[in-house]
Image (cartoon, rainbow, N blue to C red):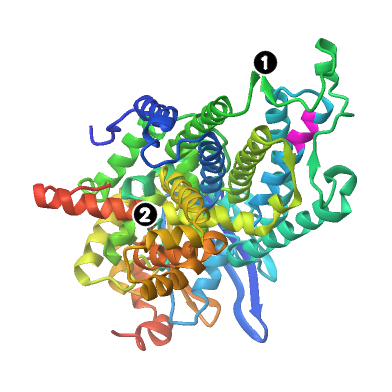
Amino acid sequence: MVLEKKRSDLMTMLMFSLVVFSMPIWLDPLGANYPDLLQKFAIFGIFAIGYNILFGLTGYLSFGHAIFLGVGSYTAVWSFKLLSMNVIPAVIFSVVLAGIVAAFVGYVSLRRSGIYFSILTLAFAQMFYNLAYSVLTPITNGETGLQLTLEDPRVIDRLFTAAGEGLPSTELFGLSMSGYSGFYFCAVMLIMAFYISLKIFNSPFGLKLKAIKSNQHRMKYTGYNTRPYLLSAFIISGMFAGLAGALMAVTDPLAGAERMQWTASGEVVLMTILGGVGTLYGPLLGVAIIKYLENIFSAVNEAVLQAFFTFLPNWLQDVMVMLVSPFVGEGWHLTLGLMFMIVVIFLPGGVIEGFQKIKKRFSKNNNLKPEGE
Amino acid sequence: MSDSVLKISNVNKSFGGLKALSNVNLNIEKGKVHAIIGPNGAGKSTLLNVCIGLLAPDTGTVDFNGEDIIGKRAHEINQMGLVRVFQTPEIFSDLSLLENVMVPALAKRDGSFKFKIMRSLTDETDIMKEAVSTLESIGMGDKLHHMAGSMSRGDKRRLELAMCLIQHPKLLLLDEPTAGMARHDTNQTIELLKKIKEGGMTKIIIEHDMHVVFSVADTISVLARGEIIASGTPEEIKGNPIVQEAYLGGAHE
């Protein structure tokens, strides 16, 4: 029958898991196989997947998702401080609390749509940033950021072991969450997040969200109360962000207010759009591209550039270094901005659209069979 | 009285100084196709918006199957079985034809909100079969996976009609179902409307095109300057001198 899926969900998940778990191997030639960067891929991947459930499916552009990232991080660190260095409770509490905060922010913001919704979320982002930075200093430790100390009670851990010397590190039932084990923990979370996203995309619920994006007016006259749909999508994406925030604290147990700044929300918007809004893999691609290039470009300094252009005559070498240096190191955001502009202008559907175009051209040459998505 | 589906009583509506509807009474009987005609600015759209609860009248009541619908929200009215086709096609342009028809079918089954994310769309075989057969009935069975936005205007209108029909409405409101259509498309739509008429669905049609009205309507009400000046069968309306003066005389296309 025409309606049958070509590939089952199970197949997709197996492939996806394989790709994620083997990242340390296949990223080796690219020089990106060290745990720190791999963890970033996974964490921001979760963040972007969740963001895509709101922005990609319903079209509601939120500039406030860093709030939930921050809430997740603070909650996780508090869980490490008060309860246990085990990451499981930290992750659970973070996701739940981020969901609650998202329910509140979403309930208020979703009273409006379009640009007004975006502005409301932006206002919330600024409010929460200021709360974290100054007002709620007893909870967030303000400017310094929240971190582990030797005096932390850690009541659950104390039941089993005595406090050791020095600061403990995060662990999963004895397995330390630093290095590759930290990455694999994040990878498992990423795969779970991707599975939920896949299910939502393929469910009637997901279809209804897409229909809201396409024509909300029609949706209402078709018998749908659209607000709870939007709020559910908002809360789910908030919980994903909370999970990402918790994992940031898992890999590095401190939380600062800058994590909640609206630029952090802007970054996930960039990633999602760059990769391909509303597609299943696009946001992940966006994360991979941005985080990888950030890693490369921000490490380049003047000396590296000098070395790179040594084949040129001396005067030209200096000119080239002068021209290129603003785009690397600290100025890597200039490169990001340029890249973003190029993608948005030439590939409004993101990098994924570029792939599809290439694929279409390729298949058109081979056979003339018309293909509906 | 028991066979009345929609009962509009003593409805008045003004916009500022303009009296859009004055003392309108209308009784739509079950199983009938009721057409509302009238020149531009006669208050047809206002009346329609009152019928679906979009506009609250200044005075009067609108009862749908004995229940007052004034002040109810759009989705509640739809869930009660009062479904509307718009004047400019309101469809889901970014979705495929199949998805366009599945969404209203799901609304009929699941109600106004259902949170169930772990069920796959491909498991909804009943809904899919129904959607496919509905699309086949309007002659679009071969375009299931086409994007709705890429179709012609006439096709979009027929699609919207199919989206409404799949909900098996108790009362279907059609706002100028053939406006802006080419003659060929209009005839196709008339055939489609006649076909659903056989199913016994109650309908209100607001229409400009007399050809369409006289082909499908059982009863006709003529609206002019916010008042209903005549009601009756197509034959009665055709022969009514007041109607001829107010509408037919001046609006020969």
Considering the image in quadrants, where does the C terminus of chain B appear?
Answer: bottom left
The boundaries of the magenta stretch are A75-80
* Badge 1 or badge 2: first in the primary sequence: 1
On whether residue A310 falls in the magenta region, the answer is no
Give the residue number, with chain letter if any, for mark 1.
Answer: A174
On whether residue A79 falls in the magenta region, the answer is yes
Q: Is residue B211 above or below residue B245?
A: above
Identify the residue at the far front of this view: A314
Q: Position of residue B127 (x, y in %)?
A: 38, 35
Q: Is residue A272 left or right of residue B91?
A: right
Give the residue number, with chain letter if any, for mark 2.
Answer: A351
Along the line of sight, which residue is nearer the eye, A113 or B63?
A113
Residue A13 picture quarter = top left
Q: Position of residue B116 (x, y in %)?
A: 54, 32
Q: Is residue B150 above or below residue A255?
A: below
Identify the residue at the far top of this view: A160
Residue B52, disc: none
Along the line of sight, which residue is nearer the eye, B2 or A33?
A33
Give the residue type at disc 2.
Val
